[in-house]
């Protein structure tokens, strides 16, 4: 992954697993810090993990609780889906 992802600069890699990688990122225009989940599709025909990430985003987008994570943005970059 490059130094940034479409509007975010990577600060550190937090971890990876289940065909995804999680990064700590910052929006340079606002200074806000987020966790960004990058889903890796292998092989190209396997959309299971992309579908899971989309479902996770929609569920996290409907929950409002101080002890649960929220989802703010879902975007596809070069055929990869990323949730921040």
Image (tube, rainbow, N blue to C red):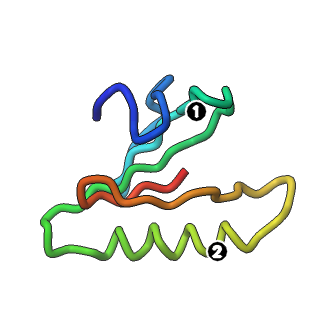
Marks counted in the figure total 2
1 or 2: tag closer to the N-terminus: 1
Evaluate whether residue 19 shows in this view. no
Q: Position of residue 71 (x, y in %)?
A: 64, 59
Residue at disc 2, secondary structure: helix
Q: Position of residue 5 (x, y in %)?
A: 39, 39
Residue at point 49%, 35% (across, down): 8
Is 82 situated above or below 54? above
Residue at point 32%, 53% (across, down): 77
Crowding around mark 1 (Cα neighbors within 10 Å: few <14, some 14 to 19, many 20+) is some
Residue on which disc 2 sits: 59
**Is 64 displayed left or right of 25 in the figure?**
right
Compute the Cα span from label 1 to label 2: 23 Å
Crowding around mark 2 (Cα neighbors within 10 Å: few <14, some 14 to 19, many 20+) is few
Residue at disc 1, secondary structure: loop
Residue on which disc 1 sits: 27
Nearest to the eye among marks 1 and 2: give it. 1
| Figure quadrant of residue 67 | bottom right
**Is 58 displayed left or right of 43 in the figure?**
right
Q: Position of residue 76 (x, y in %)?
A: 36, 60
Q: Residue furthest right?
A: 66
| Figure quadrant of residue 69 | bottom right
Q: Position of residue 17 (x, y in %)?
A: 38, 50
| Figure quadrant of residue 57 | bottom right
Is 36 situated above or below 56? above
Is 21 situated above or below 75? above
**Is 73 displayed left or right of 49 in the figure?**
right
């Amino acid at each position: 992954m490059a130094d940034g992802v479409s509007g975010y600069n990577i600060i550190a890699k937090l971890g990876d697993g289940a065909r995804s990688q999680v990064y700590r990122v910052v929006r340079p225009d606002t200074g806000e810090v987020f966790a960004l989940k990058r889903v890796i599709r292998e092989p190209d025909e396997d959309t299971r993990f992309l579908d899971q990430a989309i479902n996770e985003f929609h569920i996290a987008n409907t929950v409002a609780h101080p002890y649960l994570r929220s989802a703010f943005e879902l975007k596809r970059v070069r055929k990869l889906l990323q949730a921040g």
